[in-house]
Amino acid sequence: MDLIIWFRTIDYLELVDWTGRQIRDDKRGHIDNTLQPILSRLGCTSAEWMIACTHIEQGRLVGSSRAIKAALPHLNRKRLSGVGLPDC
């Protein structure tokens, strides 16, 4: 039987960020505790991130407008149909 734990995406990101900050001898590295929380580093609010996640589920591109434009040729796409996040 598969175990499923339901998370809000924001809670999952915070868990991953917290886990990455843990310092252990058997880990190659860690996220420096002086760095801002993950959404702050991405430059978006939790509301903006939730909108972006909804668009990911719909198969749209998510990222800065610069990153989305750069990805189009690699995806054989000509039109922008994504969600812009702040340019970081």
Image (cartoon, grey):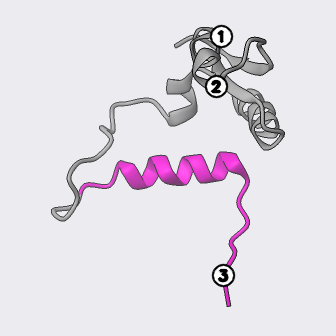
Q: Estimate the spatial distance between the alpha carbons at disc 2 and disc 3, rounded to whole Å.
A: 34 Å
Mark 2 falls on what kind of element? helix
Chain-order first, disc 2 or disc 1: 1
Residue 78 is marked as none
Q: Is residue 38 above or below residue 7?
A: above
Q: Is 9 or 23 nearer to us in this picture?
A: 9
Residue at image mark 3 = 3
Percent x, y for residue 10? 67, 45
In the picture provided, is 76 more to the left or to the right than 87? Answer: right
Query: Disc 2 marks which amino acid?
Result: Leu
Q: Is residue 6 above or below residue 74?
A: below
Chain-order first, disc 1 or disc 3: 3
Question: Could you classify mark 2 by the number of other residues whose Cα lies within 10 Å: few (under 14), some (14-19), or many (20 or more)?
Answer: few
Residue at image mark 2 = 75
Q: Identify the residue at horizontal 23%, vertical 58% (top origin).
A: 27
Q: Is residue 4 above or below residue 66?
A: below
Q: Estimate the spatial distance between the alpha carbons at disc 1 and disc 3, rounded to whole Å.
A: 37 Å
Q: Identify the residue at horizontal 57%, vertical 12% (top origin).
A: 70
Which segment is the magenta one? 1-23
Q: Is 59 or 1 nearer to us in this picture?
A: 59
Residue at image mark 1 = 65
| Camera-nearest label, 2 or 3 | 2
Query: Disc 3 marks which amino acid?
Result: Leu
Query: Disc 1 marks which amino acid?
Result: Ser
In the picture provided, is 54 more to the left or to the right than 84? Answer: right
Q: Estimate the spatial distance between the alpha carbons at disc 2 and disc 1, rounded to whole Å.
A: 15 Å
In which quadrant will I find the N terminus?
bottom right
User: CB under 8 Å between callouts 2 and 3?
Assistant: no
Mark 3 falls on what kind of element? loop
